[in-house]
Image (cartoon, rainbow, N blue to C red):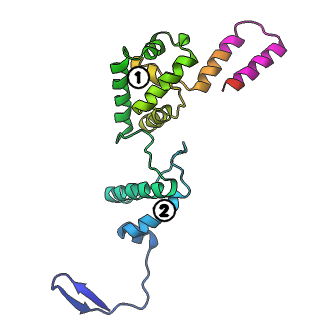
Amino acid sequence: MKYFDPKTGQLDLVHAPDEVKIEIKQFNRRVITESFNRVVCNKLAQYIDPSFREKTLIFCVTDDHADMVVNLLKEAFKKEYGYVETGYGDAEKPEDYLNSFRSYIAENMNKIPALMLVTQRPRDLTRAQLKPLKLELDTAGYPEKHLQVAWRESTNEDIAASIIGFIRQAALGDALISHEARVDRAMNKILASRNWKPPQRKWLERIGKQLK
């Protein structure tokens, strides 16, 4: 068979065996082609929905291979779902996104009245006041979903906290607590406040489940 000799710059002849045994695992580690990885990424995109909260681990051989896979996956997701979303806005890293959110809260604390209520008197915040606040944060690039993803990627803690929890964490350093945990804490406090009759206790427990 003919092969190109880079030393001489000429084609030369070499005898090759009729059968060549190849270790697939070693072959895939040494031969990294964009076309092969594109096929793999396109197939993965059919099974991985970027809007899901589950994590997917993809192992790469080198840093360059990892960069290639990231770019190919972005292309595949855009082709499959029509968009590419990191889950934490335009920031390159989740930590940068969370820091940006903290800066936004600090800069707008005196400009958006509802932010002051969230940090000082959260119980006084009404749904009518919360709705425009969430819209304001969505417009600024800080929707609740993006904050949840950025927190999970940054801390490895999967906490479905509310936007109020994220605001208080950013402004006051409060620990993030999921909505379900807050409901459980409140219901436990109510149930322990007096000796409820069995029917009353059952109704309270049902209310707690509905609130989740």
Near mark 1 (Cα within 10 A), the count class, few <14, some 14-19 or many ≥20, is: many
Is residue 134 positioned above or below 29 on the image? above
Residue drawn at point x = 47 percent, y = 37 percent: 149
Q: In this view, does 202 lie to the left or right of 117?
A: right
Estimate the x, y position of residue 20 in percent, counting from the top left. 42, 84
Estimate the x, y position of residue 147 in percent, counting from the top left. 45, 32
Estimate the x, y position of residue 135 in percent, counting from the top left. 48, 28
Near mark 2 (Cα within 10 A), the count class, few <14, some 14-19 or many ≥20, is: some
Residue type pointed to by label 2: Asn
Q: Is 124 or 158 nearer to us in this picture?
A: 124
Q: In terms of image quadrants, where is residue 169?
A: top left
Is residue 105 positioned above or below 11 on the image? above
Magenta stretch: give its range: 188-209
Q: In which quarter of the image is the C terminus?
A: top right
Estimate the x, y position of residue 16 in percent, counting from the top left. 35, 90
Q: Quadrant of the N terminus?
A: bottom left
Is residue 25 positioned above or below 162 on the image? below
- Residue 42: give its label: 2
Q: In terms of image quadrants, where is residue 203?
A: top right
C-alpha gap between disc 1 and disc 2: 38 Å
Helix, strand or loop under label 1 = helix
The answer, for residue 142, to whether it is visible in the render is no
Helix, strand or loop under label 2 = helix
Residue drawn at point x = 57 percent, y = 19 percent: 127
For the stretch drawn in magenta, the main secondary structure is helix
Q: Is 41 or 22 nearer to us in this picture?
A: 41
Query: Which numbered disc, 1 or 2, marks the residue that appears first in the sequence?
Result: 2
- Residue 39: give its label: none
Q: In this view, does 41 lie to the left or right of 123?
A: left
Residue drawn at point x = 55 percent, y = 58 percent: 46
Q: Mark 1 points at which residue?
A: 170
The answer, for residue 207, to whether it is visible in the render is yes
